[in-house]
């Protein structure tokens, strides 16, 4: 928690120096999830249709990945997620995942998803 406070203070100083005003999300978790999506848009994964074992494929490389068993979303299997990192054991596991609306991906990175839009990202 101490590290979180330090990073927050550092970001606060940087935004003040750059003249960027701070605005609270005031409990709007969708705004927070959209911000995370914008930062990790390249780490999006989609649940494979008819998957009975929670298999996802990454949008970028079509790599087979799974939600890590320690995640609260393990066995929930949301259709779309973004993840922070992959851990390799017997499978590739996604760590630190959140559910996302696929439209947030194209909104955050239209340049990145231009090719994928016609195949895997709903418009």
Image: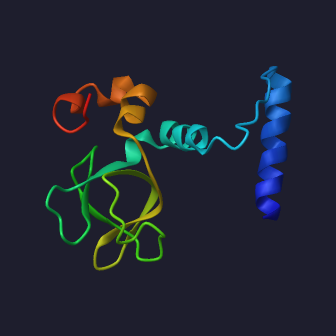
Residue 36 in the image: x percent, y percent? 54, 43
Q: Residue furthest front?
A: 27
Q: Residue furthest top?
A: 19
Quadrant housing residue 101 = top left
Query: Quadrant location of the C terminus?
Result: top left
Horizontal side of residue 28 vs 103, given as left or right: right
Q: Above or below — where is 119 with respect to 21?
A: below
Indicate how the structure is coloured in the image.
Answer: rainbow
Q: Residue furthest bottom?
A: 90
Residue at 78% over, 39% down: 11
Residue 43 in the image: x percent, y percent? 39, 48
Q: How many marks?
A: 0
**Residue placed most toward the observer, 52 or 45:** 52
**Residue placed most toward the observer, 34 or 11:** 34
Residue 5 in the image: x percent, y percent? 82, 54
Residue at 47% over, 44% down: 40
Residue 66 in the image: x percent, y percent? 31, 66
Horizontal side of residue 15 vs 60, given as left or right: right
Residue at 47% over, 76% down: 70
Query: Quadrant location of the N terminus?
Result: bottom right
Q: Above or below — where is 26 with respect to 5?
A: above
């Amino acid at each position: 928690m101490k590290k979180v406070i330090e990073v927050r203070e550092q970001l606060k100083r940087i935004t003040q120096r750059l003249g960027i005003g701070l605005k609270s999300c005031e409990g709007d978790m969708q705004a927070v999830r959209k911000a995370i999506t914008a930062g990790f848009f390249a780490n999006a994964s989609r649940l494979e249709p008819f998957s009975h074992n929670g298999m996802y494929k990454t949008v970028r490389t079509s790599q087979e990945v799974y939600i890590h068993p320690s995640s609260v979303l393990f066995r929930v299997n949301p259709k779309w997620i973004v993840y922070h990192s992959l851990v390799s054991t017997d499978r590739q596991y996604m760590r630190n995942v959140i559910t996302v609306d696929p439209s947030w991906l194209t909104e955050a990175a239209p340049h990145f998803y231009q090719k994928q839009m016609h195949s895997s990202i709903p418009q």
